[in-house]
Amino acid sequence: MATGWARRRGWFVGGWAGRLARPAPAQLALLLAVVSWHTATNLGGTAAAVGYGIVVTASMSVLVPWGTDLLQRAPTWVLPALAAGCVALLVVAFVMGLPDAYGFALGVGSDRANALDVALAQLADGRYPYTATTYVGNPITPLPGALLLAAPFWWVAGTAAWQNLAWVFLLLPVLNGGWRLRSRPTVLWALTALGGLEVLREFVIGDDLVSSAIPAVAAVAWTLRAARGRATWVLAGASILLGVATCTRPHMLLVVVIAVAAVGMAAGARRALLVGVGATLVWVALVVPFLRGGVARFSPLHTVAKVTGDRALTVGMIAIALGATALVVVVLAVTRPSGATGVGWLCAAALFAPSVLSLVQRLLVGPSAELDLTLGAAAVPFAVWATASPLLRPPSARPASPRAGRTVSASRPMAAAPADSEPRADDFRRRRGSTN
């Protein structure tokens, strides 16, 4: 009797022990700790950065399974209420901003937030945007796709920072595979948005490294789903969205390569060619008009200076780009990802590479080299998506037994299993004899 009670509580292997052994939340926590290192160090030194890494790892490893279990047993209104509460907290944090005492440490007034506003103001005045500089004198970094995505928010609200609200909220249905909320993806979203120090910092002050990657996650997810469908025009539309959503930073082109390879493995070479051509044409249409005045004027290329030390189009820059592409191709050939988990983690690894390169340069050159671990922050949305995706897989289909002489024919397939494989709260109450 005691053994059965303990098993229901999940105290044996396969319960809490099995859940804590799952590596994906811990990997996500490690990523959050690394990209948040600079911010945590500004707040409290190295001890604070190490402490934050320990806390966020423990939180992800414990709160994800624990919170999921609680929400599965709770009344159905609790999960939407939790999501609404998190949304309200994020809105208040964005509108109120950071306390003045923490403004300098958390980078208030970042020129990443200012770059989009300056570039869009230049375009609105009919001027070339990439010869302008931010208020601290740095060149404009975002690619034309980022300007296109931010333009509606700048036009309505006067600043592109308001896009952070839309994109962080968009991540919630992307993780849930639709508008129906599920407990584990929702818990992951809340912990990342509110507990990811760099994620929250960028969200509040208006930086776009994290938020600009969320439309790319949505585009990749839609592309993978459309690749398995029958409508070619839907896949063509997804490829266009993929091109726009990834044309935000130069290294986001690697996401296109990974998505095309995944489509090829899941749906064949023709569909992969459609996605690759569509996304590439969008990149060409967005970037080429801004290159007509010369590559030297196209300031987004200055990002390579963070890893090469030179803002010009150098042999080192070309070698790094070709080497990164070759490495991605080799990894794709070995892993052959076709689902959200493999694709998400590969995209996260590719987008985290700038942080690794910045660290390598610092180790090789010394303190004179700039160390910016936040450069890999765009990997976070893909890592969250990859962590959440296994939680949405339907249970494996079982052959149906015929009833009253009826059989299931090929012309009348069974209905697909529901996308949510989590047990419902009513099932738990029924099993445990709850009267609540």
Image (cartoon, rainbow, N blue to C red):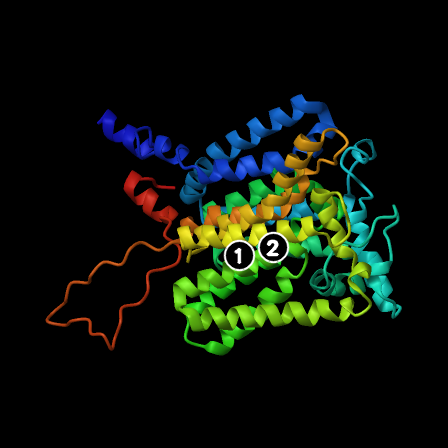
Q: Residue furthest top?
A: 47
Residue 196's quadrant in the figure? top right
Q: Which mark is residue 174?
A: 1
Q: Does residue 45 show up?
A: yes
Q: Earlier in the sequence, mark 2 or mark 1?
A: 1
Q: Can you identify the residue that label 2 sits on?
A: 214
Q: Which mark is residue 1?
A: none
- Left of 234 or right of it: where is 205? right
What's the residue type where badge 1 is placed?
Val
Q: Quadrant of the C terminus?
A: top left
Spot occupied by residue 232 in the image (x, y as percentages of width and height): 47, 77
At 69% across and 51% down in the image, what residue appears?
Answer: 315
Q: Secondary structure at mark 2?
A: helix
What's the residue type where badge 2 is placed?
Ile
The foreground one among 49 and 184 is 49
Spot occupied by residue 410 in the image (x, y as percentages of width and height): 22, 74
At 72% across and 29% down in the image, what residue appears?
Answer: 366
